[in-house]
Amino acid sequence: MGMEHESEWNAAQSIEISEDLVAAAKLQLKFLAAVDRNRWLYEDQTLQRAIYRYNSCWLPLLAKHSDSRVTNGPLVVPLDCEWVWHCHRLNPVRYKSDCEEFYGRILDNCNVASSVEEISTKETEEIWNAMYPDEPYDINSTRSDKVPENINGSENNTKYNLVLAIKRQIPFYYQVSRPYMNTNQFLEAAVARYKGFLHLIKRNKERNITCFCVPTYDIDLIWHTHQLHPASYSNDLMKSLGKILEHDDTDQNRGKGQKLDIGFSKTIKQWEALFGSRYWKAGAMYRGSTPSPLTVTPFIPKLIGKEVTAHNKFQKLIDLPESHVIEVVLEFVEIENLPETYKKRVCVHFSKAQPDGIFDVKRKLNIQSEFGRKQVATFQCKPTGKLFFELVSDSTSNLLLPEPIKTLGCGSIALEDLVSDLSVEKWLDLVPSSDTISSDPVRLKVAASCTVPIPAPHVLKIARTSRLSKSFLTQVTDGNGNEIIGLQMREMKELIGITKEGETVIGQLIESEWSLMDSLWTLKVQKMLLTGPRTVKLIPGRKLDYEPKHHERKTNKHNFMTAVEFSAEYPYGRAVALLDVNSGDLMVQEAWFVLPGLMLAFIFLNISRKETEFMAEEAVFKAAVDKDKLASGGCGSGCGGCGNMVRSGGCGSGCGGGCGGGCGNMVESGGCGAGCGGGCGGCGGGCGNMVKSGCCGGCGGGCGGCGGGCGGSTMKSGCVDNITGGPSIDEQPMQVAAHA
């Protein structure tokens, strides 16, 4: 950052904000999580009632309270009214004008407590019930009260369409619900960037530059937080900008060439010109659309208390060290002192100096000043060691015999330094290779940012290795190939854990249920439902946070199983593990679920394997029986006829019909694809025996990579054949971050 850039940044940081935005942002995240647990607040009918209560009950009560306090403690706003109030305030200009029209002043949140704060509502409820005896203080999804017919006829109703305003804000929580966003370090940096954002808008105003400035999600979170304090927001912005800054969330089209895309590209250029630093931010970019919900009905299971001692006893069977992970966004901005012979012919290979089990590859990235356009990479790694860079010659494309790649110099950045500030932008003097002669060292400008470290998922591999007696031993290893535990199923009745210390019975089949870890957990096999200290269900496909994004390969849902926890905190489900059925790879997000997750995955794989073996044996038997019984070719029509097996190397289908006892035996579709097949039984006693569809491959999203990106692509780990992956590299202007 040059002196002029530093002067501008210091001027930005001198902007006065009269609220503690870090603490307020944490409260906002807590509130948005509560709303997301009560998704009836997203539905039209309950929204209409909430809006009615907000206009007819909450705002008049708030106005009375602001005139003269009606409670000794703070006034506590009901959850549904707070949700409407939240979205109304996010149009600060309209909220101010509505308040002044109906109440003569801005109705602020001074001496008002959020519904998610641990403050008694007793006083507020008493006042509410006295003012509105026919309207309860709290409502929930079970209430079916009709909204009064004059809901839109109240003289104090805003003309602002609150339903649409609320609908626009629903996706915002997914973008900011990442674990590191709730940390002081991340939020303090976000407040500094928010001040930079305001300063950029101020400079544009002074220079008569028209630009629709688009925030990244860290900035947008703080911007929202500031607006939720309407009096402070109005005063602070009038003082710093000379006007109340509008918050336009109506444009949501992220397509190339649209208003958001153009505005974001201009914001990037203006920010970099004004402050001399990158505008993108690791963990603050668009992470894709909200995953599809598993259910529209919340599921809150009744948990049965268990003895913790049993849990501890079995958890000691597996001792996995805790590790952390960060997301890194990397760009090579500029190069100096490059010999003329290599101009426009160099790129940078980047890697970890020591592979860490998460980021174990070497990747190529172009230099913006040489390549002519911005190229950014995003990846995940452990927050230790160094990022290692090699400047290499890139052979020209017009040569019949390309020149060999030559290393011109190398450099590195310590990840500990990056993590301490969450960003770094510096010139590196590259150490020349032994055969490179230059009077001045080649210098490379590197820009990187990272997220706050969070616990890394455990990636385990479940692999059948050898036969013991009448059953197989399955070995579980970690990402580095270290043996963790051996698992063995004995006669489909006992589950044995095998470690260096010996064997331990960790599960028993009792009728149709598995009792695991001395009855700490119970697995209902038919439902694949695990109950105990928590409730987890195994669901086919990649669900919730594991859902494939638009740029990833679509996979057969049976290739993956997602373990989803349901609880009071997550009534609509939270993904805690992902199982790749083909490879046996298991990614576990939570330490408490490592052993239960392994047992659940192991039992599922064993049951699936038994069913597959049975079906294969049945197919062979029926093929032999039906070999000479073809009554009528093709689809096996004809009385008493049988449709033989149809094999297709690609996408096959077939039917076996036949009247009076005919049978459709098997349709098999194989190949390296999703293969499809259909089988139908005959009429009058006919049967469709088996449909088999084979497919291989899979798509993995990396170790939990986060959104962000360039142009039309989202920053995620690339598509690979399992649940671990490498970095993505984007070459277009970075994708629009926030819309609201």
Image (cartoon, rainbow, N blue to C red):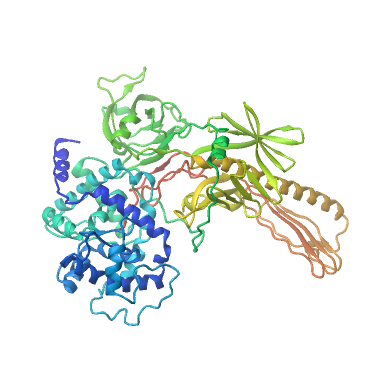
Q: Residue at x 26, y 27 (%)?
A: 337
Can you name the residue that lies furthest to the right here?
A: 628
Residue situated in front as seen by the camera: 364 or 459:
459
Image vertical order of residue 41 relative to residue 342, above or below: below
Q: Position of residue 473 (x, y in %)?
A: 69, 34
Image vertical order of residue 707 relative to residue 337, above or below: below
User: From where the camera sits, is residue 95 visible?
Assistant: yes
User: From where the camera sits, is residue 106 visible?
Assistant: no
- Give the total number of marks visible in the rendering: 0
* Image-based side of 549 in relation to 374, left or right: right
The quarter in which the N terminus is drawn is: top left
Q: Position of residue 671 (x, y in %)?
A: 66, 48
* Image-based side of 472 in relation to 45, left or right: right
Q: Residue at x 35, y 56 (%)?
A: 32
Task: Kindly indicate the quadrant of the structure image that contains residue 37.
Answer: bottom left
The quarter in which the C terminus is drawn is: bottom left
Residue situated in front as seen by the camera: 174 or 248:
174
Residue situated in front as seen by the camera: 425 or 455:
455
Q: Position of residue 396 (x, y in %)?
A: 40, 33
* Image-based side of 624 in relation to 423, left or right: right
Image vertical order of residue 98 relative to residue 646, above or below: below
Q: Position of residue 273 (x, y in %)?
A: 20, 44
Residue situated in front as seen by the camera: 583 or 26:
26
Can you name the residue that lies furthest to the top here?
A: 434
